[in-house]
Image: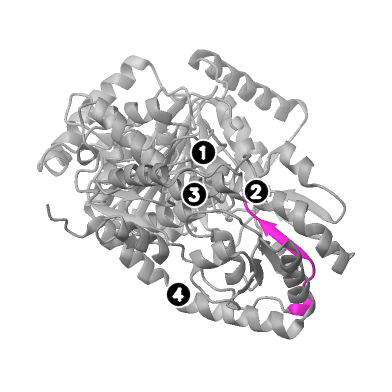
Amino acid sequence: MMAAPDILDAPAGRKAALVEAALIWNALFLNDIRIAFRPEAAPVISVVIVSRGARHLLAWTLAKLAGHQAFAGPAFEVILVDNASDAETRTLFDRVDGARILLNPENAGFGPACNQGAAEARGRYVLFLNPDIDLMPGALAALVRTFAEADDVGIVGGRLVFPGGILQEAGAGFQDDPQLTHPAGRGGLDPFAPEASYVRDAGYVSGALLMIEARLFTELGGFDDLFAPAYFEDTDLCARCQQAGRRVVYQPRAIAIHVESGTSVRRADVEALLDRNRVRFRERHGAWLFGQGPRRTGFGPRDDAPFALRVLYVDDRAPHQDLGAGLPRANTIVNAMADLGYAVTVCSVYGEREEPATTYRDLSDRIEVIEPCGREGFRRLVTERAGAYDVLWVSRPPHIRMVCEVLADLGLSPRDVGRARVVFDSESLYALREFVVDALKGRPSPGPSLARATALELRTIAAADRVVCVSPADARLLRRAGVADPVVLGHVQAPHPNPPGFAARRGFVFIGSLAREGEPNIDSLDWFFGQAWDFLRALMPDAHVTIIGAVAPSIAERLTRPGVTVLGRLDEIGPALDAARVALAPTRFAAGLPHKVLETVARGLPSVVTPVLAGQMGWPDGTGYRVHDWHDPRGFAETLAHLHADAAAWTQVQCAGLAQVGRDEDPAAYRAVLRQVCEAPTFP
C-alpha cells in the first residue's frame, strides 16, 4: 500500500533545490570535477538547453542530465545555447565535455535560441529542456516510447513537479476566459494523483520539457519569433502541431523536478510579456480554439479526449492478472477498451492505493485508476464528474447494488452516469456461490432463501442496457432467470508458441490469490493439504508444490511445509509455469470463469481440476486438463501422480489444450464483442 507522499511547501522546496544547486556548483570547482557527456555517433535525442545566467541551476541541470547516460535509455546528445550569460556562468562551460555549446553575444530570446540549437540537432527527436530541470530515471525512454506507440503523435510533454513534491503541471489545456491557458493539476498536493497518472492528449505541454520529432519541428518552422523573447512560443507550437493533424500527448512516466522561473527576469517584466503574448496567441488561434464552442482539457473528468468513448468501470480494485477472483478478466476487458481508444476510468471500490509503478504493471497507461474509492468516493466521483461518461460498466452484483443505491440516494439513475450505455457485468452469480459455500460448511440455506437471493441479484442486474457474463453456463442461468440476451465475454489468452516439453519440467504448481480467508483458493488448498496431500506424498515421496499468488502472511505460514514452497506474487510467472509439469486446481466452489485454468492451459501446462472448474470452462476431460472430483481425495492424488509420470498422456493433454485455446481465444473477435456491448445502439 502506498502512503500519501511527504511534501514540502513550495518556498521550502524551492529553497532546498537552490541550496542543492549551489552545492553542486561549488563542488565542481572545489573538487576540480568535469561534467562529461559520452559522445554518440547516432543519437536518438538531441537535448537543447537554452541558458541565461542562473549558473547554479544550470550546473544542477547538466550534472543531473549527465547521469542519465548511465541508464539503459535512448542515446542522446546535448546542445547548449547560451544567451549572453554573465562571465561567471560561462566559466562552467570550460568544465563541460561532450556537449556542443553555442555562445550568443546577445540575448536572442528563448524561441530563437531553441531554433538555433535545433538546427544543430542530429537526433530523430529534439527535446527542449529548461536549465532548471531534474529528469527522473526513465523519462527520456518514456518520451520516445510515446512516439513509437502511435504514428500521429507530434509533441510529447511530461509530468512537472515543483521541488518538494507539489504537482506543477500534468499537461495543459485552454478555456475561453481571461487566463486562456490552464496547466492541469497545478498546486496539487499529490504528484501521483490518479488524474495525473495516465497518458492523454493535451491542449499543449510546457516548453520546459517538450519533445518533438525533428522533421516535424522543421516543417512547422520551429518556434515563432512573434513571441520572442519568451512565453507562449511553446503553446503556439503545440497549436500549430495539432492544426497540422498531429497530436500533443501528456506522458506521466516522464517525470521531472522543475524549479520554474529559475532564470527569469523581474516578475513585472514576466507578466508584461505574458499579457502581450497571450493577446497575440488568441488573435492567431482563437477561432480554431473556440470557434465550435468551448475547448478545454481539464484535470479529472476525462474530457481530454472529447471524441473518445468515455467509460467508468467499477470493480473491486485495480484489476491485475496476478490477483485472481475475476480480476484477470477485468484486466483483459479494460486493456482491450484502452486498445480500442476508449478513455477509461477504473473506480476501485475496495482496493488500497498502490505505488504507481505497481498500479500500471499490467494496465495500459492510458487508463485512469482511482483507488480506494468506496461508497462515499463513488458518490463524490459521480457528483464531481456529472455528465462526463458515455458508458457506466459495473462488475459484480454487490457493486451493482451499491451503485444503484448511491445513485438513487442522489436522485439519479445509472443512465445519468452512463449517458449512452449502462452495462452490468454479473462476473459471477454470488447467490449461487454462497449457497454452495454454506452447503460445504454444513449449513445449507433453504431453497426459498436461495430463490429470493437469486431473484434480488438478477433483478438489479437486469436493469442494465446490456448484461455481460463470463461463460455460456452463466448465460444459460441468466436466461432461465429472465435476463434477455446476456453477452458472454470471458478471457482472451494466446497459446504459448513453443512451450517446454515433458522432460524439461518437474513438480506441481498452484496459482491464485490467497490474500483473504474464505475465498475459493484458500478453501481449495486447505482441502488439498488436509485430504489429498498425504496420498500424493505416499505415491510420490519427493512431490513438490510451488504456490504462486498474493498471499497473506498468516496463510503462507499455514501452507508452508516440507515439499511446499510459497513464492507469493511474482511480477512474471511465465518461467515458474514453464518449469512445472502439472498444475493443480482443487476448487470446491467458485463462480465465473477460472482464469488460472485458462492461463495454465494456454501456457502449455496441463492441470488437474475439479468438475466445477471443468463445467465453467466447458471443455471435455483431456483438453488441457484432467478432471477428478474433490469428493475422492485419493483419486485426485492418483490423477496428479499419473499425469506427472506418464509422458504420453501428459503430451496428449498439453496438445489438446493448446489446440482448444487456439480455436477459442481470438483477440479480434473479443474486441468485436466488446465494441458491440459498448457502442451498438440500444432501443427502449
* Residue 14 drawn above or below residue 168: above
Give residue 221's position: percent from left, percent from top: 29, 52
Q: Marks 2 and 3: in contact by CB < 8 Å?
A: no
Quadrant including the N terminus: top right
Give the distance between the C-alpha atoms of the residues marked 3 and 4, in whole angstroms: 26 Å
In terms of sequence position, does the residue under pointer 3 or pointer 2 come before the other? 3
**Residue at which label 3 appears:** 433
Q: Earlier in the sequence, mark 1 or mark 3?
A: 1
Q: Which residues are magenta?
A: 502-513
Would residue 76 be found to the left or right of residue 335 on screen?
right
Q: Mark 4 or mark 3, which is nearer the start of the sequence?
A: 3
State whether residue 200 appears in this view.
no
**Mark-to-mark CA distance, 3 and 2:** 13 Å
Q: Residues within 10 Å of mark 4 (few under 14, many from 20)?
A: some
Which coloring applies here?
one colour
In the foreground, 296 or 38: 296
Asked if the stretch drawn in magenta spans residue 511, the answer is yes
- Which residue lies under the disc numbered 2? 523
Q: Pointer 4: what residue?
A: 664
Judge whether residue 664 is colored magenta.
no
The residue labelled by disc 1 is 255
Amino acid type, label 1: Ile
Measured Cα–Cα span from mark 4 to mark 1: 41 Å
Q: Position of residue 578 (x, y in %)?
A: 70, 68
